[in-house]
Image (tube, helix red, strand yellow):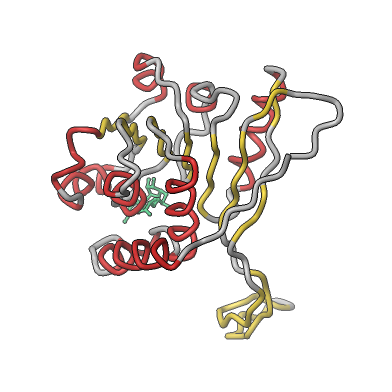
Amino acid sequence: MNHSISVSIEDCHFAKEIYELFSRKSGSEHIASEVSLQYLTACLRVFKPSRVLELGAGIGTITETVLSHPCAVSELVSTETDPYCLSVLRKNLRSSGLQRLTVVTTPSELSRLKFVADMIIGDGGFYSTEEMSTARVGTVFFTEGRREKLRNAFTKELTAEGRTITFVNYGSVWKWEKGFRRRLGWTAFLPRFGKTKGCWIGIVRPFTRDRTG
Ligand SMILES: C[S@@+](CC[C@H](N)C(=O)[O-])C[C@H]1O[C@@H](n2cnc3c(N)ncnc32)[C@H](O)[C@@H]1O
């Protein structure tokens, strides 16, 4: 069975407030896109996860989205290794969510928690077995942007365990984008018509031969 996630006006307002807040912060060049935050907000509203694993917290845009969402996530475990991000992460968050957050910096630290995730949000991380094995049947996997390597690693791990996942792309649109591109040995500032990254969402299912999603 395939899923279909629609973004509401309230999701858009919620995502916009967080995106604008974090895009003004130092180190914001790698933060999640506003459209991804809209779909993540919709997922939190629809699936109401209690325990969430976040892969690659960065400066905390997704962390804050999860902790301040009205679905009231009870526990968020976030992975991060970058020293700059670790130094600003907690300072960037509103204090109401801090006691529900655990930050881990190695796969073995995560493994010791024996964490089971209702939702996994991928925007970096270790690409480790320890992260993948927090999933159960019904776990929702959300990736910010394409994250093809992460989706493939996760799918491979699940398949080996007799489970499966089908990712669906949301929020991508075709548009002209300007940027420096290399053509025939020259670098030029050229427009390119392409699809924006959006986000990908899948749900872990038991493997059956006639699966459709
Ligand atoms: C796409 S970023 C994660 C962004 C995060 N989800 C957010 O929206 O704020 C992936 C990884 O890039 C690294 N990173 C992100 N921002 C950085 C910065 N300002 N300086 C150094 N590394 C950064 C971190 O290791 C992070 O886990």
What residue is rendered at 48% in x and 22% in y? 130
Total numbered circles:
0
Give the percent coordinates (x, y) of residue 43: 49, 48
Which residue occupies the foreground of this view, 44 or 30?
Answer: 44
In the figure, residue 33 lies in which quadrant? bottom left
Residue 160 vs 212, above or below: the answer is: above
Quadrant the C terminus occupies: top right
Give the percent coordinates (x, y) of residue 108: 39, 18
Quadrant the N terminus occupies: top right
What residue is rendered at 45% in x and 27% in y? 117
Which residue occupies the foreground of this view, 99 or 186?
Answer: 99
Residue 191 vs 174, above or below: the answer is: below
Residue 101 vs 143, above or below: the answer is: above
Give the percent coordinates (x, y) of residue 15: 37, 62
* Relative horizontal placement of residue 104, taking residue 145 as reference (left or right): left
What residue is rendered at 45% in x and 38% in y? 125
Give the percent coordinates (x, y) of residue 55: 43, 39
What residue is rendered at 60% in x and 50% in y? 200
Which residue occupies the foreground of this view, 38 or 28?
Answer: 38
